[in-house]
Amino acid sequence: MNTPTPTVSRRDFLAASSLAAGALAFPSIASAQHKADRIKIGIVGCGGRGTGAVNNALIADPGVQLVAMGDVFPERLETSLKNLSAKYPEASGRIDVPKSRQFTGLDAYKQVLATDIDVVLLAAPPGFRPLHFAAAVEAGKHIFCEKPMGTDPVHARDLLESARKAKAKSLSVVAGFCWRYSDRRSLFEKIHGGAIGQVRGLYHTYLTGPVKPMPAPETRPDGMGDVEWQLRNWMNFVYLSGDGLVEQACHSVDKMLWAMGDVAPLRCTANGGRQNPNPGGNIFDHVTVHYEWANGVRGVMAQRQVAGCYNDNSDYITGEKGMATTKGGLIITGENAWKYNGPRVEMYDEEHRELYKSIRSGAAHNDGEWMCQSTLVAIMGRMAAETGQEVTFEHMLKSQNSIFPEHLTLDMSLPVAPIAMPGKTKLV
């Protein structure tokens, strides 16, 4: 196998982190094979992705049953349950969520985890992910964890510590980095097998339109507090979403790391800013990051969320013997020319299929290490763009940059942090 020259490996990444020491003291718990026909699941975060995750779970394993739901907002839970029930009628037995197992408010996740579910699907806005993940591990639940794994380095490292505890407890953890569960596996297996030789350069794009534009301030209903307004428009606030690079284009950052054998880059620089007005929000709408590895490989990640522009969501990986791309198919050109002609893999279903397979077999599956590393590398790029400074991965393992508010309540006052200004915003 011809993989990139290791520099900062997964093992080095964990060893360099202060999290590694405490995790080793956690006792190992043998994973028992799940023999019950039913696997009971609960969902935390009932928006589009959460509702989609439930549907994927029900497709993936005929024994999965939804029994508990939680969301901050009652109407979001009700809409989700209504849509799911229309697809899976009562007679199917796939959905059993009475009022007593419908929970709302910021503490809804605690109530979902207090039920007898086997698996929890975590799909609330990313800022909540480390808090919800830690509670799920403490409750002994298997986890499907949507990407990304946090919005700042402090909390992303917290989730890594929780993921190591999950591993010690033999709990399965599957990440929502869905491309790793797609037919692109065939392409990356070719890359790791030496089909393009040593990787020399990477270029990844996530050029698209706004996911959810920020409403005008005057449309905010009378009496709606700061936190509710921000939660209802969470894509537009860095502490909740991580911004477009971390929340959405983290998929492309993850594929960059995947191509590099999950070796973290040494450092990065970036350009970014806000092209279009976003009154009340504080995310950039474009970021281009230049990553550098210790073996001299450079990678470019171009992300943009601007309407009316050329769109591209592709990967271009150059090696000493050829190039691999996902543009127009899964293709390798050069000495070992190849094109994928196999079946299409429904990746959203496949990630759940592998989760429930691991639970039924008793062979725990844990994506914890690489999913947290990919998140940290995405946050690293955002921080470089926000500050205009070079940011090292070593810095990410030590940074005290913590942007998610402690003790968040719906009635608290929460002024929006000003949008970052490269050259003025300090690197923390």
Image: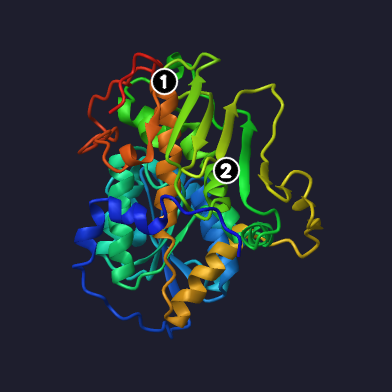
Front-most of 374 and 225? Answer: 374
Toward which corner of the image does residue 225 lie, by quadrant?
Answer: top left
Please state which amino acid type lies under the numbered disc 1. Answer: Gly
Front-most of 18 and 104? Answer: 18
Task: Residue 97 in the image: state x and y as whole percent.
Answer: 42, 63
Task: Residue 216 in the image: state x and y as whole percent.
Answer: 48, 16
Q: Residues within 10 Å of mark 2 (few under 14, many from 20)?
A: many
Q: Is residue 275 left or right of residue 69?
A: right
Quadrant where the N terminus sits is bottom right
Quadrant where the C terminus sits is top left
**Residue assigned mark 1:** 388
**Residue assigned mark 2:** 252
Task: Residue 307 in the image: state x and y as whole percent.
Answer: 65, 23
**Is the Cβ of the residue at disc 2 closer than 8 Å to that at disc 1?**
no
Q: Residue at x 57, y 72 (%)?
A: 92
Q: Is residue 273 left or right of residue 348?
A: left
Real-space Cα distance between discs 2 and 1? 21 Å
Pointer 2 or 1: first along the chain: 2
Front-most of 233 and 242? Answer: 242
Residue 291 visible in this rendered orientation of the protein: yes
How many tags in the picture?
A: 2
Please state which amino acid type lies under the numbered disc 2. Answer: Ser
Task: Residue 356 in the image: state x and y as whole percent.
Answer: 49, 72
Q: Residue at x 42, y 82 (%)?
A: 34
Give the answer, above or below, for where 67 lies relative to 221: below
Residue 105 visible in this rendered orientation of the protein: no
Mark 1 element type: loop
